[in-house]
Image: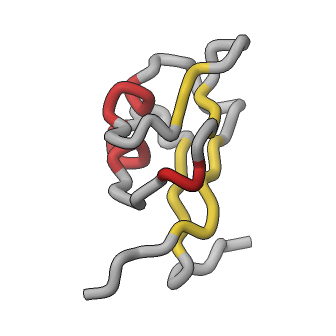
Amino acid sequence: MAKAKLKALVINREWCKGCGICVHFCPQKVLELDGEDKAAVVQQEECICCRLCELRCPDLAIEVITESEQVES
């Protein structure tokens, strides 16, 4: 199975409550809480597409989109 390649890391800031769970679970430190206590991507190039942020977010505010997936409109 080929390694997934990141196309986009999408954070819905309206849904994010700033709990920091995604930041805690990210093994590559791709995410941080910004000045408004919302999740923000700070090192997208380090993302390994493990989807831990997406799976652990209680607000469903994060979506990891890989090259093989298409964004639904």
Quadrant in the rendering for residue 18: top right
| 1 displayed left or right of 60 | left
In this rendering, the answer to whether 54 lies above or below 18 is below
In this rendering, the answer to whether 71 lies above or below 14 is below
- Image coordinates for residue 20, horizontal then vertical, percent: 45, 21
Residue 53 versus residue 31: which sits nearer the camera?
31
Residue 72 versus residue 9: which sits nearer the camera?
9
| 60 displayed left or right of 51 | right
Q: Quadrant of the C terminus?
A: bottom right
Quadrant in the rendering for residue 70: bottom right
In this rendering, the answer to whether 17 lies above or below 39 is above
- Image coordinates for residue 34, horizontal then vertical, percent: 66, 19
| 70 displayed left or right of 22 | right
How many numbered circles are shown? Answer: 0
Residue appearing at x 69%, y 33% in the figure: 13
Q: Quadrant of the N terminus?
A: bottom left
- Image coordinates for residue 44, horizontal then vertical, percent: 59, 50
Residue appearing at x 61%, y 69% in the figure: 7
In this rendering, the answer to whether 52 lies above or below 31 is below
Q: Which colouring convention does the figure follow?
A: secondary structure
Residue appearing at x 50%, y 40% in the figure: 30
- Image coordinates for residue 48, horizontal then vertical, percent: 40, 58
